[in-house]
Image: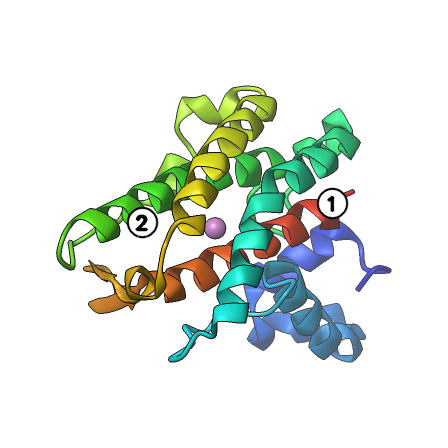
Amino acid sequence: MADLPFDLQIAIISNGISKIDRYGKIYFYLSDMENSIGQLQYPIGRFKLPPQVSSDEILQAISTIASFPKKMEDVFNALSPITLEQPYRPGGWTARQVIHHCADSHMNALIRFKLGLTEQKPTIKPYDQAQWANLSDNNLDPAISISILKGVHQRWVAVMEAMNESDWKRSFFHPEYQTEQRLEQAAMLYAWHCEHHLGHVRSVL
Ligand code: NI
């Protein structure tokens, strides 16, 4: 895929396989390219909600969530002004949008944990992440969202570190997916989410 011009990659994605023969030799590249796009979109693979979560997995998830803001800050500091505005895949978010999205998502995560801990199976509020990523605050310096992440994660980790076994079994109802999620499962999801988006931003370095 690396030796295909960028506009050709986009043409293939938007045209689909049926029109691919107009590019002749592209047949040779297609399966590699599809794999590469999947790899770009899901750099650490897709998340599957685990039915069971062990106490070791919870500790690992807390550790991943705790170290995320600093890791994202390190990658952000390594980005040039050009790579900051570069989509991590054709049609994908820019690194700038990814960083702001992490702040959007993890502010919601902290609220979901607090609702789950203080109410009986509360219904949480989904939000349209694509539309949130296009509001004008996304033009701000991503360093602002790194600061948000540092504060939010510090509070989130403080909440999680004080949770006992029965707290982790508490749950909230996600109306978008019509599923009940236990907080231990949500921690696994958000640990994945940290690594998932770190993978995106690292890929444009
Ligand atoms: Ni996300």
- Which residue sits at x=73%, y=35%? 74
Residue 115 is situated, as x and y percent measured from the top left of the image, at: 22, 47
**Quick check: 167 above or below 74?**
below
Looking at the image, can residue 136 be seen?
yes
Q: Which residue is label 1 attached to?
A: 204
Number of marks in picture: 2
Q: Which residue is label 2 attached to?
A: 113
Question: In the image, which disc is placed on residue 19?
Answer: none
- Which residue sits at x=59%, y=50%? 197
In this view, the residue in front, 38 or 43, is 43
Amino acid residing under circle 2: Phe
- Which residue sits at x=60%, y=23%? 143
- Tag 2: Cα neighbours inside 10 Å, few (<14), some, or many (≥20)? many
Residue 111 figure quarter? top left
Residue 14 is situated, as x and y percent measured from the top left of the image, at: 55, 60
- Tag 1: Cα neighbours inside 10 Å, few (<14), some, or many (≥20)? many
Q: Is residue 24 left or right of residue 34?
A: right
Residue 137 is situated, as x and y percent measured from the top left of the image, at: 44, 22
Ligand 1 within 8 angstroms of badge 1 C-beta? no
Residue 129 figure quarter? top left
Residue 171 figure quarter? bottom left
Coloration of the structure image: rainbow
Looking at the image, can residue 103 be seen?
no
Residue 173 is situated, as x and y percent measured from the top left of the image, at: 20, 61
Q: Residue furthest right?
A: 3
Amino acid residing under circle 1: Val
Ligand 1 within 8 angstroms of badge 2 C-beta? no
Query: Which quarter of the rendering shows the N terminus?
Result: bottom right
Looking at the rendered structure, the secondary structure element under dot 2 is: helix
* Pointers 2 and 1 in contact (C-beta within 8 Å): no
